[in-house]
Amino acid sequence: MENLSGVTRTQQNVALGLSTLAFTVCFAVWTIFSIIGVQIKEDLGLSETQFGLLVATPILTGSLSRIFLGVWTDQIGGRIMLPLQMLITSVAVWLLATVTTYEMFLVAALGLGLAGGSFIIGIAYVSRWFDAKSQGTALGIFGAGNVGAAVTNFGAPFLLLAVGWEDTARIYAVVLAVMAIIFFVLAKEDPVRVEQKKTGRKPVSALKQLEPLKDIQVWRFATYYFFVFGAFVAFASFLPRYYVGAYGVTLAMAGVFAGMYSLPGSIFRALGGWMSDVWGARFVMYLTFIVSLVVLFIMSYPETAYTVTGIPNADGTPNLINFSFGMPLWGFVFLSVILGFVMSLGKAAVYKHIPVYFPNNVGAVGGLVGMIGGLGGFILPISFGILLDITKVWSVVFMLMFIIVAVSTIWMHVAIRKMDRERHPELVKDTHLSDVPHQRSDKTAPAPSE
């Protein structure tokens, strides 16, 4: 069965499967500080702000690298770029186990962060194997490699307890290097690269690939991704620390609860891609933002005690009624699962737009969107730490996220309405369109009797 010129279903499945597996491994490495960082925090006596910076540093490299990794992938192909990126990252992860000071941990974290660049390499590589009608589903399946965060949250705490954080890092480095070799041996050149070699046609220049970045739509998509991906990475790294501090659970249990957020935040990305193919990415983004606003509002409500003055007692003394409100652990975990689920849908919806709007610049445009989204994963953990040090209120983190989502939702709705009116100018002055039925009735309603 062929979907693109000369490309078989088997070839598509192999390319998609290998890319998704590689991305899963890379994502597990990228979020390793969510677990070993808690132990390092205790060993070095770090503040919340210092811990937030440590967790966020790999996200910075993984984000900034996406723009040039995307361009390079369009130039030389994902089959070369992805294993090369994994091998370089594995060296940095191995060296992580040899440092002892906070400053050197930050340097090692910068190198480890290259693991996050695997996303845009895979997006550019996978998109070339599928046509526009099925790219949303294919890229959604690939993006499910975010489940690597759940792998780390579920498994790394037990690995850390068994062998220590240093050997945990070494094991991650070895697994990453082995995956690089497997991908290079089994993966094939994508159809675009094959065609370029046949015809001798040179890839589009890097400068030409960057031209679409002038389009405001690219930056709007990037803003959406700041939340659905950047906040996902930030929460995946922050939640273990949150559960330990706010609810007093063990690190192992905190990892499990954080994994319950990361898992649906990853595996349902494929569903989000399918929904975007069937109902459109716009619908999926509205669903994501609206549900997120409701969930974040509830999660942001702090543990609060109330005293209400009721009807005075029979003897005339004041009747003070005391009660409190707070989110129980089970309730918070449940809401985090819902949040992870809709964020997963939103991640797929954002990337559904890119190969449709910019089919010849997937690497460059996807790299910018991924970079801005990834910067959310860098900025937010630091912001979390600063807010916690200042306010000493755990739920302030979710208050911040509620504001960010509210702004994104308003911008999206205003932009969509503006585009609709530009496409249909006759609607600009029609203030009664929503009141007029599609088909008027021919029957004349009887005049009201007096």
Image (cartoon, helix red, strand yellow):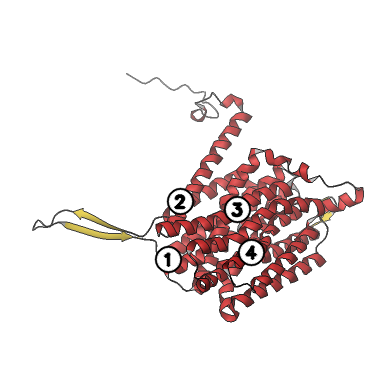
Q: Amino acid at mark 2?
A: Val
Q: Are marks 2 and 1 in contact (CB under 8 Å)?
A: no
Q: Earlier in the sequence, mark 2 or mark 4?
A: 4
Determine whether, in the image, residue 83 is placed left or right of residue 107: right
Mark 3 touching mark 2, by CB under 8 A?
no
Residue 107 - label = 4
Give the residue number, with chain letter if any, for mark 2.
Answer: 294
Q: The residue under label 4 is which amino acid type?
A: Val
Q: Amino acid at mark 1?
A: Ala
Helix, strand, or loop for circle 1? helix
Give the Cα separation between the discs numbered 1 and 3: 26 Å
Residue at x 39%, y 55% (from the top left corner): 301
Q: CA distance from mark 3 to mark 2?
A: 24 Å
**Label 1 belongs to which residue?**
246
User: Would you call the spot at circle 4 few (<14 residues within 10 Å), some (14-19), or many (20 or more)?
Assistant: some
Quarter-wise, where is residue 266 in the image?
Answer: bottom right
Q: Which residue in the structure is indicated by mark 3? A: 375
Q: Are marks 2 and 4 in contact (CB under 8 Å)?
A: no
Q: Position of residue 369 (x, y in %)?
A: 65, 48
Instruction: Choose between 208 and 287: the one closer to the eye.
Output: 208
Packing grade of label 1 (10 A; few <14, some 14-19, many >=20) is: few
Q: Secondary structure at mark 3?
A: helix
Q: Residue at x 73, y 49 (%)?
A: 363
The mark closer to the camera, 2 or 4, is 4
Q: CA distance from mark 2 to mark 4?
A: 39 Å
C-alpha distance separating marks 2 and 1? 21 Å
Query: Which kind of residue does numbered mark 3 sit on?
Result: Leu
Quadrant for the N terminus, please.
bottom right
